[in-house]
Image: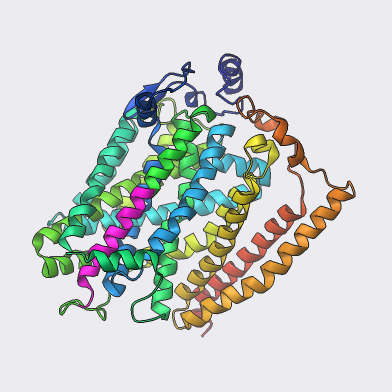
Amino acid sequence: MSPRDLATTVLDEDLDFAPAVLDPAHIGDIEGALGTVLMSDHAPRRTWLRRLLTFMAIMGPGLIVMVGDNDAGGVQTYTQAGQRFGYSLLWVMLLLLPVLLINQEMVARLGTVTGVGHARLIRERFGRAWAAFAVVDLFLLNFLTLLTEFIGVYFGLGYFGVPKLLSVGLAGALLFGVAVTGRFRWWERFMFAVILGSFVFVPAMLLAHPHWGPIGYHLVVPGIAGGVSGSAILLVVAIIGTTVAPWQLFFQQSNVLDKRISPRWLSYERWDTFAGGILTTLAAAGMVIFGAALFHTKSFGPRAAYVDSGWFNHAIAVTLGPVAGAIAAVMLVVAALVGAGAVSLSTSYAFGDTFNRHHSLHRTIRTAPVFYGAYAVQIMAACLVVALGSNALLGAATQYVQVLAGILLPSASLFLVLLCNDVEILGPWINGKVLNFFAVAIVAILIVLSLDLTVATLFPSLNAVVLTEACFAGAGVVSLPAALAIGWVRRQRIARGRLADRRAGIALLDRQSWRMKPLDQLAPPQQSLLRSVSVYGLRAYLVVAVVIVGVKVFAPFVH
């Protein structure tokens, strides 16, 4: 039976599942790490105990994607923020929480309602060229990010004297071993166990002897110790870049499918995402507080350069003692394992989704060879590069991860907003006006900050303060008139009957029974002015980014 026939058969029996599903393994009981929800279960959850048990079974994709955000690169960035600026950047952590929640709620909704992964939706609604760009860029960025995760494993275990080849080899074998069991539940249990290890940030924070008064103040009052400077602005932008990553969008949407979460359970998945967001924000703040132990100390004062995570582990050991140094190393290893597990799976999901191959952790190597082959190749390649590469190469890889993330993130966020406003895709589940306002504002800010980070990273001699002011000023000059013009033109076209306002009728549709049609039955995307401006604007942005990178790469050869 084909995937479509199986999905249609299931749809006749259970309206919770969409007929567009590409892999039959994505249909069935929810088999979570902490419980099971049967596909035929339609019983209302009338008591708090039943709701809690259901939540525990569904919990996973949101928690893992959020905690995975605090990966090895995140640990390095957050502890660096504390080491250089004390508690003064804690407000950034709190500010980023709604950004994370809005983005990840949209992909969770896309996954449950459509039954299709993020990469496949981009291909179907924006064409093969944009899909190829998104997927190839994602593969490259994810691989570089995977390098940083294994670098984190190397630095963390290196603190205990474990050789580089052994540390990265064991980490790679562990990640692959838990994924190829053919049991989604076992993989999720492993990720939960590692996430429990991430709570090591609590004793780490307490060993730093925090001052709770200043911490509470800096959580709610923006400011920067020593005043606004170029290095402070770049670090803030780097925090945003490491907190809001493109792989998160692709991972959660596909992981929601793989766990077989349908729209009936979307509210539980939203709570899962919210809980993960709270935990990752607390952990990030704890890392900042931990790093602040080095702020204004004699041996490692604010003038000390943050060389790498290995430097930080030993600096903490000198300042707070060997126990604190060991905790810092464990914190780095745990973060790297969570990040590596999620990032590598994100790539494999996108690969299978794009080429219409089986892509599920419910499958074995025999039934999903391409999916697990892609998973194995990227892990093996990353392990070899880290094990055999020079420190200079590894340092360059870590640096340019942020540059590639800066280039990809605006496109990923823009596609996400456009997909969530596509009536053919989400029907009555599309974004509301208030959510769209915040989502568009987030995309605009991310574009400006990403361009700022890209330019500043490639050209460190530029004045970061002036650059940031120029980026925001330019964005304001361009975006406000453009938004007003687009809104006016759209209203005029609707009034004259030249543009169908398809949103007007969606309020009549029933969310409980509406599901996306099979992809080949969808009507072509409505070519609205906003969509056209967004796509052409994205092309212009990418041209500018490519020119900037090209100038940086080829300028030395010209001279």
Is the magenta region chiefly helix, strand or loop? helix
Q: Is residue 335 left or right of residue 403?
A: left
Q: Is residue 147 left or right of residue 7?
A: left
Is residue 551 depicted above or below 147 in this figure?
below
Q: Is residue 416 visible?
A: yes
| Residue found farthest to the left | 322
- Across and down, in percent, residue 398 comes to 37, 63
> How many numbered marks are there?
0
Residue stretch rendered in magenta on the structure: 278-296
Is residue 173 depicted above or below 45 in this figure?
below
Q: Is residue 500 left or right of residue 320?
A: right
Q: Nearer the viewer, residue 489 or 550?
A: 489
- Across and down, in percent, residue 158 comes to 17, 58
Is residue 353 depicted above or below 148 in this figure?
above
Magenta span has 283? yes
Q: Is residue 173 visible?
A: no
Is residue 181 depicted above or below 285 in this figure?
above
Q: Nearer the viewer, residue 189 or 196?
A: 196
| Residue found farthest to the right | 496
Query: Which quadrant would the N terminus be assigned to in this image?
Result: top right
Q: Residue at x 31, y 59 (%)?
A: 285
- Across and down, in percent, residue 265 comes to 48, 29
- Across and down, in percent, residue 363 comes to 41, 26
Q: Residue at x 44, y 62 (%)?
A: 240
Quadrant in the rendering for residue 513: top right
Q: Nearer the viewer, residue 551 or 38?
A: 38
